[in-house]
Image (cartoon, rainbow, N blue to C red):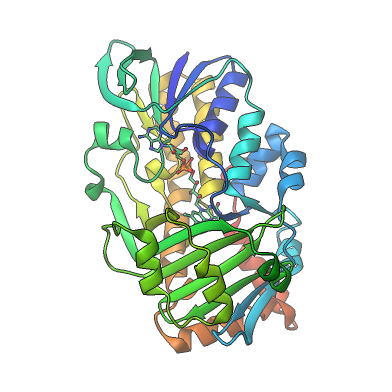
Amino acid sequence: MKVLICGAGIAGLTLAWWLRRGGAEVTIVEKAAGPRSDGYMIDFFGSGYDVAERMGVLGELREIAADIVELVYTDPRGRRAGGLRYASARAVLGGRVLSLMRGGLESVLRSCLDSGVEIRYGTSVAAVRDVPGGVECELTDGTVSRAGLLVGADGIHSAVRGLVFGPEERYLRPLGYHTASYLLRDTGLAEEVGRRAVLVSVPDRQVGIYPTRDGALAAFLVHACPETALPADPRAEIAARYPGMGELAGRVLSHCPQDPYYDCVAQIRMPRWSRGRVVLLGDAAHAVSLMAGQGASMAMGGAYTLAVELLGADTEAALERYERRMRPFALGKQESGRTAAGWMVPHQAWKIAVRNRLSGLAELPGGGAVMGRAFRRLSESVIPAA
Ligand SMILES: Cc1cc2nc3c(=O)[nH]c(=O)nc-3n(C[C@H](O)[C@H](O)[C@H](O)COP(=O)(O)OP(=O)(O)OC[C@H]3O[C@@H](n4cnc5c(N)ncnc54)[C@H](O)[C@@H]3O)c2cc1C
């Protein structure tokens, strides 16, 4: 089987690995000029962790994982308002959770790909035509590629989805927030933050800072914003949106680069994920949003599920079965993402206070059991037990 994957992100790389292992011929086209690095900090558990274990890459992932001991909520004056010890979260997840930079995860997935997988950087899909037994794709480098299947693994703003299923507005559901992230280096700030992830919260805004494995810090900003359209100058927008968040947040914001990662926080909801010999995977099909905190895991779980189905049945039946297995999970995670949004970055001060108090639940008598149930539901995996 010949498969063309659009997007060398978490979903595309994982799918390529599993398909190659099953003997498929795989080419990936990736819009970026080269491997993307850095990004933002990801809590990695559930389906993604299970798939990584089956790929035999947990050792490499542990080596690059950040060693965070605690998540701390503070007010702008730096006063601790709540928090969660990572050891408590790890314990209820049976130790099966890692804090990874998105770029680090992608880099491990890329490095374990066999050399038979070609990744064509700086290239995308410009047009798609059905042909007997497959698709013919015009690529942006002027070449034409024929394959038995085209997989759109090109993220929340998927070009393949736009070409085959129609415009983004039909499927994109904004959750009312914008987000930004960037890496920074500041020795004094790194010493102050230590091994903690610190989140400074006020109504409608949150500035987060996470220590990475190599001494850099990952900034993570979220603010309420009803607009879907993105600002022309994200850095200026950030400067305008985050005044008065206190000294620590101010130092984080002072490092904002000219071109940070910036996007609206949204989900993708579609009635079908495949049409003919074109199928969508990961965020392109069912972005759950950062509020659900499981998009990377869902991308890997979906890639594994799609590969297993494709290697075991004819393409049409495989696409049906992939969707039947994945959809209930995706819908469930999307629902938790919508519920979580109002608690992750509350609009009201009272809600911030309640969230901060509840974050310490695990440390109270009986609280561990309650949190355990919530975390186990959250980490439910699409991967059947081995
Ligand atoms: C701030 C933030 C925090 C997050 N935190 C978490 C978390 O804690 N846990 C978690 O599991 N998930 C988290 N997520 C979500 C997670 O990052 C995504 O769900 C995940 O990256 C989806 O993987 P993907 O491969 O489907 O898409 P992507 O990671 O978006 O990869 C898509 C790839 O396709 C490429 N591409 C895009 N357009 C084209 C095109 N036209 N042609 C060719 N290539 C193209 C891109 O360059 C990229 O390489 C977070 C997301 C954000 C923004």
Residue shown at 36%/57% (left/top)?
266
| Residue 343 image point, x, y percent | 47, 75
Residue at image point 32% right, 60% down: 174
Residue 168, quarter of the rendered image:
top left
Q: Residue at x 64, y 20 (%)?
A: 114
* Quadrant of the rendering where the C terminus is positioned: top right
Looking at the image, residue 347 lies above or below residue 69: below
Q: How many labels does the image show?
A: 0
Report x, y in % for residue 135. 32, 17
Q: Which residue lies furthest to the top in this view?
A: 132
Q: Which of 154 and 263 is in front in this view?
A: 263
Residue closer to the observer: 106 or 167: 106
Q: Residue 139's quadrant in the figure?
A: top left
Position of residue 323 in the picture relative to residue 357 (left or right)? left
261 or 160, which is in the foreground? 261
3 left or right of 51 in image: left
**Where residue 20 sits: x, y (%)?**
58, 19
Q: Where residue 164 appears, x then y in whole percent?
A: 26, 31
Q: Which residue is drawn at 64% across and 51% down?
A: 100
Where is 67 relative to 194, above or below?
A: above
- Residue 311 visible in the snapshot: yes
Left or right: residue 28 compared with residue 263? right
Indicate the quadrant where residue 191 lies: bottom right
- Does residue 177 appear in the picture of this structure? no
User: Considering depth in this image, is 305 or 11 the residue closer to the camera?
Assistant: 11
